[in-house]
Image (cartoon, rainbow, N blue to C red):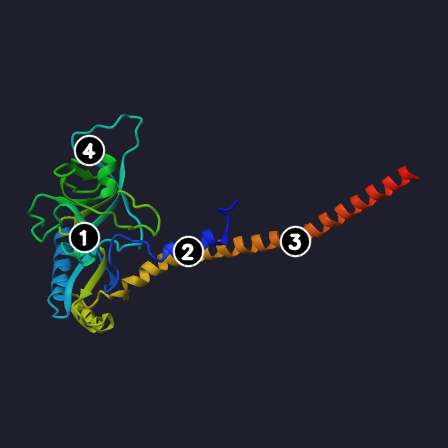
Amino acid sequence: MHEFSPGLFVRSFLALQHIDPGFTAEGVLAGWVSVPQESYPDAPRQEAFQRAWLERIQALLEVESAGLANLLPLSGQQHNCFDIEGRTLDPSEQLPAVQYRAVSAHYLRTLRARLLQGRMLQESDDRQAPWALVINQTFARLYWPHGNALGKRLRVHAKEAQWATIVGILDDLHETGIPTAAQPTAYWALTQRPALHLGLVVRPTTVPLESLRPSIEAARAVDKDIPLHDVAPLTRVVNDSLGARRLSALRMGLFAGAALLLAALGIAGVKPRARAACSIDTHLTRHLAALRAA
């Protein structure tokens, strides 16, 4: 009973303010573009656009690093089934699925994701190189509990997909929600798996985030017909994700407080009746005693 208290919900509410999402959103500007398939119908042309646009942004003096991904953190989910080289599934087993991300070489560095083993994706992980990917710790522990995930290969169920080698393991990023548990996630090289929907993250050197907007807009000269949408600090995305949780915790805390208040008022209302009953009982006892004495 003591656990159902406003204090518990207040502590839960305060804990939401200090959740580590596994990446650093502070000081990052984010936005996204949708690349028309009519103009960029195949992987080489899509990859060329991505590279040219990103190079323009990274060349800006006020930019420390920048990256692209098919999905920004907390902006959605994409599950893909996959095969692990050398493993066969029992006919009764379901195909394993993973949160699929395709990211540029500096995307994870821009988010300041924490590398636990191996290496990050690199510029050299291009279309001419053997395919590479990085996985999160949850994925590694689930499929390689003895810690030997590096060097293993898997292939996502997608058109023209190749076997990709695991070259690094990251600390978990909460990609799908805060504070929900991290899901198994794999990060392919965007140069090897181009995407039409591209999320952009930019970390400036020392300039305010707002001052980056004109420069980033200017980088659209690669293709002025592709608009950049929803340019905003990445912290806003994180706060939006936490907002619903915070509101839920706050409401539950208020309801718990109201319930306890009503219970306290109820107890206070019952106690005088209990005293009155005791008084009546005492009065009746004395009255009966007097009758017996008579």
Please tell me how crowded label 1 is: few (under 14), some (14-19), or many (20+) other residues with Cα within 10 Å. many
Q: Nearer the viewer, mark 4 or mark 1?
A: 4
In the image, is 271 to the left or to the right of 57?
A: right
First reached walking from the N terminus: tag 1 or tag 2: 2
Q: Position of residue 283 (x, y in %)?
A: 82, 46
Identify residue for label 3. 268
Q: Is 165 drawn above or below residue 258 in the view shown? A: above
Residue 289: percent from the left, percent from the top? 86, 40
Q: Which mark is residue 103?
A: 1
Type of the residue with mark 4:
His
N-terminal of the two: label 2 or label 3? Answer: 2
Dot 1 falls on a residue whose secondary structure is strand
Mark 1 or 3, nearer chain start = 1
The answer for how far apart the CA atoms under marks 4 and 3 are is 59 Å
Mark 1 and mark 2: Cα distance apart in space: 33 Å
For image coordinates 23% across by 35% down, the residue present is 143
**Residue at horizontal 12 percent and vertical 38 percent from the top:** 151
Q: Whole-Å distance between the Cαs marked 4 and 1?
A: 27 Å
Do tag 1 and tag 2 residues touch (Cβ < 8 Å)?
Answer: no
- Disc 2 marks which residue? 13
User: Vertically, is 30 above or below 118?
Assistant: below
- How packed mark 4 is, by other alpha carbons closer than 10 Å (few <14, some 14-19, many 20 or more), is few
Q: Are marks 4 and 3 in contact (CB under 8 Å)?
A: no
Disc 4 to disc 1: CB gap under 8 Å:
no
Estimate how packed mark 2 is, as few (under 14), some (14 to 19) or many (20 or more) residues with alpha carbons within 10 Å: some
Query: Which residue matches tag 4?
Result: 146
Residue 95 is situated, as x and y percent measured from the top left of the image, at 28, 34
Q: On the image, which quarter does residue 111 sit in? A: bottom left
The mark lying in front, picked from 1 and 3, is 3
Toward the right, the furthest residue is 294
- Residue at x 18% of width, y 56% of height: 107
Q: How many numbered marks have been drawn onto this rendered protein structure?
A: 4
